[in-house]
Amino acid sequence: MAVVPKGEMLYKIYRTLSYGLSPLIHLHLHWRRLRGLEHPIRWRERLGQPSLPRPSAGPLLWFHAVSLGEGMAAIPVIKFCTQRSPGINILMTTTTVSAFEVLKDRLPVNVIYQFAPLDTPAAMDAFLGYWKPKWIVIMENELWPNLIMGASRLGICLALLNARLSAKSFRHWSRPLLFPLISLLLSQFSLIAPLSNVQAIHFQLLQAPPFCINFSGDLKYAVNEYDLLKEDAEHIEYLQKQLSQKQVWMAASIHRGEEERVHNILMQSHPDIVTIIVPRHPLHGKEIAKVLNKGGLNVALRSQHKKLIPGTSIYLVDTLGELRHLYKLTPIAVIGGSFLPGLAGHNISEAAAAGCAVLTGHHIGHFSHMVREMQQLNPLSVMQVSGKLELEKALGELFADAKILESRQNAAKEAFHSLSTAVVSSAWDLLDFHLSRQVSDQWDVSVIFLLTGSCGCSPHGVMSPAEYYSELAKGMDWCFKELN
């Protein structure tokens, strides 16, 4: 019982420090703006200063996602909310410019888009005071103390969707100094919807309220199709025609250091092959192109609208928002961020949805649950390789045998379809269930609960409290090993 008072003390220390350090934080914001890491015009939104008026009528639901991946996962939920509950105003925030550039054209017309405020008392209090949300849905793991405690103080219901904590974050929060603070923050949530049983155990061990933990599946399976701008769509269609008679594969979400492992794979055995490289950070595209050009490779940059000419071996995509469509140009997708220690993988579901044969490394972090789920449905759906030699061998086998390639493509697409259908139907059924119930003002959290069930929902159906705690017990040894 002493945890909460200590947590409150730690929060007061955090709030005081974040207040005292506000001038330095603001200077850092200006430094980021000068480097192009903050929006040149709308950067003041990060200080809690709105650029749009709040709708005068109706309650407001605030969705917050840190970056592009989390924001894309939230869009299907936002669209469904606008269809089912048109009287609810929806506010969407992210923190990165790259997310803004893509999401602003994907959101429904009436959704308000702002940059998220910094977690300083002045910025967060100004933001909450102006927008006055009734509910806040946080995607994945944005556990900012001033946001959470400020919302709780105002009686705003909080939900954490696609909730996850990496092993590193779990160890970090489990330290004696920080444990009371995270326990206090998690106790403010009405709902925590973790990605997996292991993630649920993480939150339980950090003293999240046990009966606010419910499962809905991974929302990244539910990312819908979206339209491209006419110019971009025409370019991809033209690119598809150019590639139709060539052998092609894609290395997607590649991090620095990984491009050295992929750029010359198969070049000797397949000199006519075209490799599509999509850097994780598009700003690194020109830098990567210079390195590859020095190595004697002919590189075409997407941002410069360069066309493939005879001898082009690398098509380097240094733009945002097109990856889902580009996957349709290639039969094979290698997902980066997974071949070097310290990396944590990336979303494989978009490649699987496009019908690619999916390959990834072993450093996949919290995406391990996604790989495991797909492999459980069909072992051929995802192939994991350890390094350059294994990757080259796997790619060679796929290009050499059309039947093996087709079987892996079909396995990936079918596994994705099974998992995405379950996520969407579960979310919609639960939404119908909760909105149809009579809820008192004290517990008016129907929209927040739209992606969960009552205690006893598992990723694959109903789980009784006894079964849930059995799963909890099974995972404790694993979590304690992570701590040690």
Image (spheres, rainbow, N blue to C red):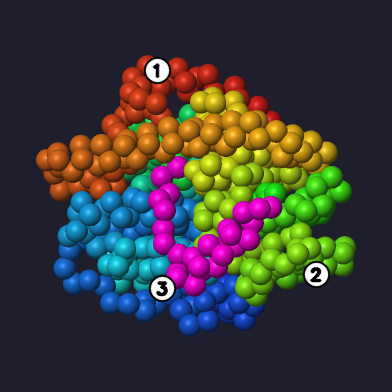
Q: Amino acid at mark 3?
A: Gly
Q: Amino acid at mark 1?
A: Glu
Residues under numbered marks 3 and 2 in contact, where contact means CB atoms less than 8 Å apart = no
- Report the magenta stretch's main SS: helix
Q: Select label 3 or label 1 by which is in front.
A: 1
Magenta highlight range? 221-246
Judge from the rendering whether residue 299 lies leftward or rightward of residue 453; answer left or right: right
Residue 127 image offset from top left, x and y in percent? 36, 69
Q: Is residue 240 magenta?
A: yes
Q: Amino acid at mark 2?
A: Lys
The C terminus - image quarter = top right
Residue 316 image offset from top left, x and y in percent? 69, 63
* Mark 2 residue element: helix
**In the picture shown, does residue 99 fall above or below 328?**
below
Q: Real-space Cα distance between discs 3 and 1?
A: 44 Å
Any mark on residue 290, and which?
A: 2
Q: Which residue is mark 1?
A: 467
**In the picture shown, does residue 191 fall above or below 40?**
above
The N terminus - image quarter = top left
Residue 393 image offset from top left, x and y in percent? 79, 36
Any mark on residue 48, and which?
A: 3
First in residue order: circle 3 vs circle 2: 3
